[in-house]
């Protein structure tokens, strides 16, 4: 039996009324959660699905449905609301989902039509105070999922057709257990979900980890914690939610953390019960972490990816090294390949949806570059696919150079390019109040920390910040290099054509 379900059943037997899941309006104790998940599991088994898609808003009902699928032994396919209808349709067909659990029938219909599917029947239920629909889909393709698949998770990535990462229940539970230990979760604690639950990090860290620890998963709607879509965020609403729900822990992206820090820098008090703020999804940057520390936020940066069941390494209260992503968690083993790529074993994927392939290798290649210091802390230096080779044959990870640039007070954002060139060019977003001479001085300071082959030889000022709205930043805060290059490529080429430009 699932360790998560065992923990819920244990809570139901020993602490039946202790809060397990809540949104502030609907409160489920451990006994009510166990009963609701068990009842829905029976309904789902009767439909005999191959895979079940979840199209639900963040709510206690999402947790009940997810646990019901775990109990029924059926693959769950979370459907991100921030995906386009075309992407959602791709997910349905790619995973072979033949049942859809939805709380918005109209939106579900749009997705089904886009996927070329129709509804054979739908059943209405009230789960955790929310009306949901169990929709049997006609026309779903037969898709091969690896044996033991409990969840098929999709991330937007940089393409319109993301791959479905197939994960086993044991892998998710091992990661959840590591996170519960790292965050020191215990009965009576409350974790606030501020990210969409189809995001694997929130699913594992925000639902499974608290339940394993006998704590409470607080799951209000995303709008009530200030998140609108994938790019709009109201830090004030998150601050209000942290206080109102007396949250002890929360998971944020760097963009959300930046908003929260800025709000606290205006003089607002730090939520008194908050003791563990995990940040991931993209590099947070040392400067942001320093600002967070000054306003009293207990922030701990981590690292992971879907293929490794989310979190691999995490700083903790007992072991923190700023600039690193922490030590590997107990379930993970991390090594560095000769070319610098981070390799991970333990709690890795079973395979990809619909892909006939051999079992994944025991060492999962992450596509990230990094190093491990003498004390076991992992440092991520860039993406292998982003690495460029200069005309002198030197390998440069642009993230490395960008990190040095954005440590300068005058530089808010930077994107560095240099494939096949003698030196690199940076597209710079200056911080407010700094003129071009200050930026040039900042670049010179950053260059002094870099070897000559990695230094920035010229720069140009961006037309505006990189944001998800203009397509130049991912929702997690990573620069979209293709989009930035498309916008500034002609200007970059002109800089290389100017013979008078030299290395700063």
Image (cartoon, rainbow, N blue to C red):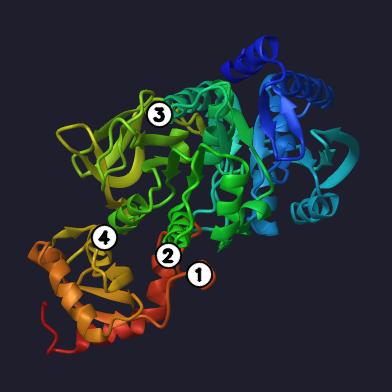
Cα distance between the residues tagged 3 and 2: 32 Å
Mark sitting earlier along the chain (3/2):
3
Q: Which residue is mark 3?
A: 182
| Residue that badge 4 annotates | 403
Query: Is the residue 118 above or below the residue 171 in the image?
Result: below
Q: Quadrant of residue 128?
A: top right
Tell me how far mark 3 sits from mark 4, CA to CA.
27 Å
| In this rendering, the label closer to the viewer, 2 or 4 | 4
Which marked residue is nearer to the observer: mark 1 or mark 3? 3
Residue 461 falls left or right of residue 455: right
Q: Which mark is residue 471?
A: 1
Disc 4 element: helix
As measured in the structure, the alpha-carbon distance from the residue carrying label 4 to the one carrying label 1 is 21 Å
- Residue under pointer 2: 480
At a point 19% along the width and 80% down the height, the residue shown is 440
Disc 4 crowd, CA 10 A, few/some/many (<14, 14-19, 20+): many
């Amino acid at each position: 039996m699932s360790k998560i379900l065992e923990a819920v059943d244990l809570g139901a037997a020993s602490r039946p009324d202790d809060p397990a899941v809540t949104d502030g309006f609907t409160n489920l104790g451990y006994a009510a959660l166990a009963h609701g998940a068990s009842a829905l599991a029976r309904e789902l088994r009767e439909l005999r699905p191959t895979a079940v898609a979840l199209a639900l808003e963040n709510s206690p009902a999402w947790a009940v449905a997810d646990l019901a699928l775990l109990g029924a032994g059926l693959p769950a396919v979370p459907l991100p609301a921030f995906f386009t209808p075309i992407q959602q349709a791709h997910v349905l067909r790619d995973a072979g989902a033949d049942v859809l659990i939805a709380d918005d029938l109209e939106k579900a219909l749009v997705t089904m039509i886009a996927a070329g599917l129709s509804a054979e029947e739908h059943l209405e239920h009230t789960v955790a105070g929310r009306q949901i629909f169990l929709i049997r889909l006609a026309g779903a393709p037969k898709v091969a999922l690896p044996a033991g698949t409990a969840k098929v998770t999709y991330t937007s990535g940089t393409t319109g057709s993301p791959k479905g990462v197939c994960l086993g229940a044991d892998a998710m539970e091992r990661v959840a257990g590591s996170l519960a230990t790292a965050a020191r979760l215990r009965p009576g604690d409350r974790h606030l979900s501020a990210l969409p639950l189809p995001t694997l990090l929130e699913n594992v860290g925000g639902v499974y980890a608290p339940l394993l620890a006998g704590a409470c998963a607080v799951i209000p709607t995303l709008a009530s914690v200030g998140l609108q879509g994938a790019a709009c965020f109201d830090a004030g609403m998150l601050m209000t939610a942290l206080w109102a729900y007396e949250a002890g822990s929360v998971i944020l992206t760097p963009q959300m953390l930046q908003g929260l820090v800025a709000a606290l820098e205006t003089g607002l008090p730090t939520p008194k019960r908050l003791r563990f703020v995990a940040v991931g999804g993209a590099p947070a940057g040392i400067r942001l972490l320093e600002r967070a520390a000054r306003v009293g936020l207990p922030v701990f940066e981590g690292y992971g990816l879907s293929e490794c069941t989310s979190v691999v390494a995490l700083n903790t209260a007992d072991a923190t090294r700023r600039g690193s992503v922490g030590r590997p968690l107990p379930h993970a083993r991390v090594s560095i390949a000769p070319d610098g790529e981070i390799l991970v074993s333990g709690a890795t994927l079973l395979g990809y949806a619909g892909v006939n392939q051999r079992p994944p290798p025991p060492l999962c290649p992450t596509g990230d570059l990094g190093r491990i210091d003498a004390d076991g802390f992992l440092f991520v230096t860039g993406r292998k696919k982003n690495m460029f080779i200069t005309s002198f044959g030197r390998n440069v990870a642009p993230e490395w150079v960008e990190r040095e640039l954005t440590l300068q007070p005058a530089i808010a954002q930077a994107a560095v390019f240099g494939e096949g060139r003698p030196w690199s060019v940076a597209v710079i977003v200056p911080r407010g109040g700094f003129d071009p001479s200050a930026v040039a001085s900042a670049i010179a300071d950053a260059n002094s920390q870099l070897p000559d082959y990695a230094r920035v030889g010229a720069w140009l000022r961006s037309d505006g910040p990189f944001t998800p709205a203009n397509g130049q930043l991912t929702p997690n805060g990573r620069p979209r290099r293709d989009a930035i290059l498309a916008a500034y490529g002609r200007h970059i080429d002109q800089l290389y054509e100017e013979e008078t430009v030299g290395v700063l």
